[in-house]
Amino acid sequence: YSEDPYREFLPQTGQVCELIWPDNGTRIESGITQGTNVGTAFDPMLAKVIVHRDSREAAIAALIAALDQTAILGVTTNLGFVRNLADSFEFTDGEIHTSWLDTRPESVFTPPVCPEEVLAQAAKLLSSNRDKGLPTDGWRLAGPARPQRIRLHAEGEEARWIDVPEAPHPGVFAHTDGVRVWLAHRGQNWLVSGSDGMRRDKHIVEGGPEVLAPMPGLMLLVDVADGQAVEVGDRLGVMEAMKMELSLTAPVAGRVSVRVTEGAQVSMGHLLFEIEVNDD
């Protein structure tokens, strides 16, 4: 599915810049191809990955192997989440039930951190981008050269200095436009770019005075007027995407400024409402 399991399974959009399916006899039922634009007008299901073996244990192992060989780059999906679920001890031991995910088990809901091997693959691809001054060649006057290093930024994380490897890391799929790198490892997608030291992330901050779009979609309803007083929890509006409606509520009390019109198509992170917090 084109959804983010670490942000309440909210729908995601984007263009499939590279598509890789497993070659181990896995059955794939898919409605996408390389270059497909995934929008908000339809159901978020992208594909089914189907395996069959003589035992549950063999089938689980085959499924994990198939997901490790699958990459849908350019769109955030739940592929890595499904892979971790299939590899969790609760699933392999048959301890799950229909409401198991509602318990938010840490084994599958802990947001992953971009692994070193994924950043190393991005460093390898971006290390030739010398015109921006990103890499260092490691030259030193009083000693042997250090390994070439590049400062990289994985989306949602702090920038890190990474040594450029001599060879690509097996099991990491990647696609680059020369500035950004879309990567997949064990089903999980990452977007990595060079960090210039001046970059600041735009985060959707809970409890702040700004209400940003938590997903791309349609602004179905605007329930408040400009300048209206609101209390914490008052509904400000409703967004809709991929058959799902999401109510947006006031995180703080104050007077609201409406920054969106009803019926508008908005991207994730778009400013929808701004609240002037009450001094008292």
Image (cartoon, helix red, strand yellow):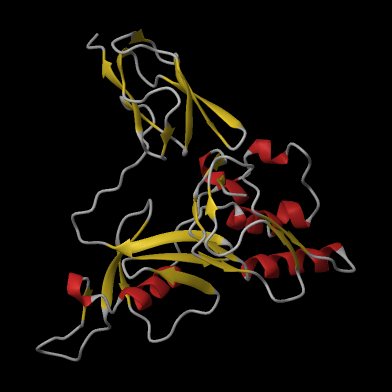
Query: Residue at left 39%, top 11%?
Result: 231
* Relative horizontal placement of residue 67, taking residue 279 as reference (left or right): right
Residue 74 locus on image (x, y percent): 48, 59
Location of residue 277 by image quarter: top left
Location of residue 202 by image quarter: top left
- 230, above or below 128, in the image: above
Residue 145 locus on image (x, y percent): 20, 88
Q: Is residue 133 visible?
A: no
Residue 181 locus on image (x, y percent): 39, 66
* Relative horizontal placement of residue 275, taking residue 10 as reference (left or right): left
Query: Residue at left 59%, top 57%?
Result: 80
Q: Nearer the viewer, residue 2 or 36?
A: 36
- 233, above or below 85, in the image: above
* Relative horizontal placement of residue 37, taking residue 272 as reference (left or right): right
* Relative horizontal placement of residue 164, taking residue 248 as reference (left or right): left
Q: Nearer the viewer, residue 208 or 73?
A: 73
Q: Nearer the viewer, residue 64 or 267?
A: 267
Q: Is residue 210 visible?
A: yes
- 21, above or below 137, in the image: above
How many numbered circles does the render carry? 0
Identify the residue at the far bottom of this view: 144
Query: Residue at left 53%, top 79%?
Result: 170
Query: Residue at left 19%, top 58%?
Result: 197
Identify the residue at the far left of this view: 141
The C terminus is located in which quarter?
top left
Residue 84 locus on image (x, y percent): 63, 57
